[in-house]
Image (tube, rainbow, N blue to C red):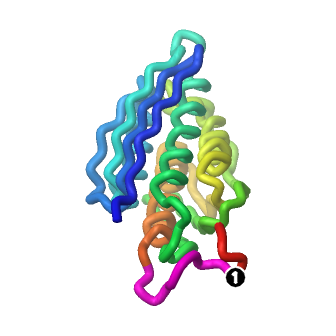
Amino acid sequence: MSRTALVERTTKESSVRVSLDVDGTGTTSVETGVPFYDHMLSQLGKHGGFDLEVLTKGDLEVDAHHTVEDTALALGQAFREALGDKSGVRRYGDALVPLDEAIVQCAVDLSGRPYLVHDEPDLVELIGSYDTTLTKHIWESFVAEARMTLHVRVLGGRNAHHVVEAQFKAVARALRDAVLLDPRSVGVPSTKGVL
């Protein structure tokens, strides 16, 4: 069974192409025009064990908002499509990830219902050209299209780079567990019969 997806999303603000293999080896190629975001999406692929290719051309002359948002929407859609009806998946995953002084806790449920809980301290406004206020919006956009529940809690940290990167790594590790096929699971892991 191939759990892959190719999503192309084009608007007047951006053009996004995302290729995803959830059963990959963590090979990534990411180019959004926002270097720190590229670094974060590469962390998501590497630590999730997902093969991920992202190519985004956005209206960076305005700012990075549309580029970052539309990429997150396409990535969420790719996860939803790659997982299909989610038969046999573990469904739940969680992780506690440190990065130097930062530590982030994450839990995910491939529930079919988009819901985000995001708890992050105030951070400096920019990491390079990356607006740190976009991190929560990335997760909002991602879960809206992936249709999953995601809890991300920053338990500690003072360096903005570490705080954001630990979030992406924690989400990656939680997703890695949630999408695993469980040999003990038959069908969709829900008493409703659908996710």
- Residue with the mark numbered 1: 191
Residue 129 x/y as whole percent: 49, 24
The majority secondary structure of the magenta stretch comes to loop
Which residue is outermost to the bottom? 184
**Residue 27 as seen in the image, left or right of residue 62:** left
Q: Assign the N terminus to one quadrant of the image.
A: bottom left
Which residue is outermost to the top? 61
Q: Residue at x 69, y 44 (%)?
A: 122
Residue 59 highlighted magenta (yes or no): no
Against 183, residue 158 (above or below) is above
Residue 2 x/y as whole percent: 34, 60
Residue 11 visible in rendering = yes
Nearer-the-camera pick, 76 or 95 = 76
Against 95, residue 70 (above or below) is above
**Residue 113 as seen in the image, left or right of residue 165:** right
Q: What range of the chain is rendered magenta?
A: 182-190
Q: Assign the C terminus to one quadrant of the image.
A: bottom right
Against 194, residue 156 (above or below) is above
Residue 11: name its quadrant.
Answer: top right
Nearer-the-camera pick, 173 or 10 = 10
Label 1 sits on what residue type?
Thr
Q: Residue at x 38, y 29 (%)?
A: 55
Residue 59 x/y as whole percent: 53, 14
Residue 65 x/y as whole percent: 61, 26
* Circle 1 crowding by C-alpha within 10 Å: few under 14, some 14–19, many from 20: few
